[in-house]
Amino acid sequence: MTLILYIVPLVIASALINVYANECNLIEDKSPSLQLFRHLFCDYESSERPTRDPKNTTVLTTILIPKMIKFMDYSNTLLVHTWMYLSWDDEHLQWEPSDFNGIDSIWIQSHNIWTPDLAIQNAASADSIELGLPNTYCIVSRNGGVVCVPPVLFSTRCNADYNYWPFDRQNCSLELSSWSYNDNEISFKDNKLDIFMIHYAKNAEWNVISVETGFIKKKSNYMTYEDFPTVVAHFVLQRADNQLWRVFGTPSLILMAMTLTTLWLDPKSNERLLIGCVNFFCHFLCIGNLHWVVPQSNATPKILMFYYNSLILAVVALILTCVLKQILDAKVSPPPWISSSVSMILSSKIGQIFLLSILDPKASAWLEESADDNSDLVNSQTPKKSTWADLNNHIEKVNALVNVHAEKCNYVENQSPHLQLSRHLFCDYDGSERPVQNFMSATNVSLFISPSFVQFDESTNIMKSYCWFVVWWTDEFLKWKKEDFRGIDLIKLRNQDVWTPSIYVENAENINNILLNVYKNGCAVTESGVASCVPEIVLKTKCDVDYTYWPFYKPHCNIKLSSGSQGSNEIHFEKSAIILDKYIPHNEWKLVNISSSDENIKSRYMTHEKFLTVNLRFSLERSRVHMWKICGTPALILAVMTLTTLWLDPKSNERLMIACTNFICHLLCIQILRWFLPHSNTIPNILKFYIYSIILAVLTLIFTYQMRRIVNTKSSPPLWISSFALMIMSSKIGRILSLSILDPQTSTRLEEDTDDSNILVHRQTNYSVIQSLWFMQNSSALNKR
């Protein structure tokens, strides 16, 4: 009976084999390449480094063949679209061509074989890090040589320098190395990276000036003392967009010429005033447009500094025009010291050229003769039945098939101690169970965070932080003795189902991104069971920001990390630290301070458990120079324009023209500011300043109109107004504001006749007092803002 129990299954199995053999189209007998493929990969493990001796080093030949190189100045990112030639020897993929119909090479998809886990160490973001090669076809030769040429896109952040924008030159570097293999496991041939520009297509915006390569050794990402070989490609790019210079460079020269022309014209002419106002308005338009084109940077580009200084000169020229016109309209003689200085300048060669008097010999002679008489000179600008015999035949067939398989299979495990160790550790391993022998004991997790890049988006109040996470814990089920496995004391895990601690971002901006993928880039385990994973992760968290002092506010943002579904009695954050050795400064935002603290929060499962949370606090600060010159400087200039309007004679056309220009520029600045300001419940102080300033500008315009009417009336003012006006006008401040200090005779009359108010005080004097009081009131109001 027992014999029957053994024979029946064999009969059934043999029958199934015959049915399969009669019905299946066995391609392997017809295809030598399929025979070779199944021979090579029947016991192949793509996660194990292809060496029989773990002490052997896998040597890589690496060549980059760029197709396109581009620099993104809005994010300071270099993009390199390139073919990457890689070759190495795989000791597990060798055969004799005579055994397979003379085949000496075969095409294999890269996901079927081991490939080096190369990655850009200074990648622009975690999204751009791709370990190993993208899926492509590789050619494998009889001796185990493998050649792959995949298309890849590399991106890296650069420390950009925009001082000489739009003629800037950028220096960027790509650091390419293995993610998990040290210099005893992987090396680059001749310690170098070759770059061939044979397929490069030129970029219309950027020219590649030079490409240099180098070799360095970097420390392990797994916080060990191992060295990792790294090849470096250094690119120097020069901006080649000549349109930018014609759009922004040429207007800067033209505006400078307009400012000089303003200073050169006769201050009494209406042309000078009109050109001065148009020049001032055009400066505002150019600076507002320039902000959207100039990249964000810690340093202010020189072209923006040029516009900034040119705007100040344009304002000075406009104010000077008004002052000179008032002086020239005065019927008083200038003091002798002014007359002497002006006469000396005008009688010189430079003075004669600027005045065009050199074209008039008589005028030149007159200037020389009249050096002392200078009272008139002033100017300025992805089922068969079977028998016992049949039974015997079937058993022989099954045995033959097994023997054939045994003869054809390329058993890699017998040759690879790494594969032996991996199968030893994971033959009964369950990645869903916490790796402790005593369930009551907690798993101690050490968490190290190394920010590489931090930026803040004030339009959404979201902080984006690109961080390296180094997570350590002890896995009690992943231990071995290195003597049993040819001295292997560390193993790299890429495809195995290993347990990792659950780490949640409690305040993540998107609920889909709340759980961190700790196993994203693989892990490493030592013989003592210490596991470490080093993923690079992009964290997006909401921030509570007060924009009252925009653009000089300091956002404070938190990242809260917890074990999420497992309480502190299961997972305990033993250590947490912040490391800034990989940090790259942002052009717009400076990382002022970063700190960490621990706190316990209640379980979301409505239990009495508490979860330990690591709270990371980032303090940021905006680079002040750029935004101040765009938003702050115009505010001060417009305030000066408002005060200048109040100081001018209400009867003059230049006062009305400057008041109208001032009002238009206020509206323009407020509309431009609206695109800069983030959405917030609070109103920034700078917006309040502009609102109050435009109100004063409107009142000044209305006041100018009313004062023109008052001055043109023929009725005399009340006596109390006349007396009060005389008292103000005879004071030092009144004389300065009314320019009477330049007229000694008028000053003398004001001092001698303070009692005779009916004679000395007229409508113009009353206007001057009201004007002065309004000027001082507005000055005080603007200072308070």
Image (cartoon, rainbow, N blue to C red):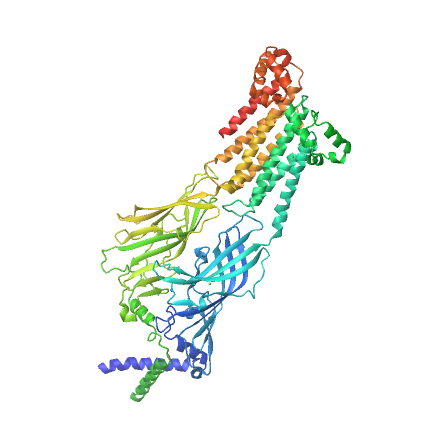
Quadrant location, the N terminus: bottom left
- Judge from the rendering whether residue 544 lies leftward or rightward of residue 289; answer left or right: left
Query: Can you tell which quarter of the image residue 723 is in?
Result: top right
Query: Can you tell which quarter of the image residue 315 is in?
Result: top right
Could you say which is closer to the camera, residue 331 or residue 4? 331
Image: 568 above or below 392? above
Could you say which is closer to the camera, residue 275 or residue 734? 734
Can you see residue 656? no
Residue that protrudes farthest toward the bottom in the picture: 389
Query: Can you tell which quarter of the image residue 273 is in?
Result: top right
Image: 428 above or below 104? above
Residue 296: x and y, percent? Answer: 51, 47
The number of numbered discs placed on residues in the rendered structure image is: 0
Residue 56: x and y, percent? Answer: 37, 71
Q: Which residue is pictured at 22% across the width and 81% down the height?
A: 2
Residue 619: x and y, percent? Answer: 40, 44
Can you see residue 523? yes
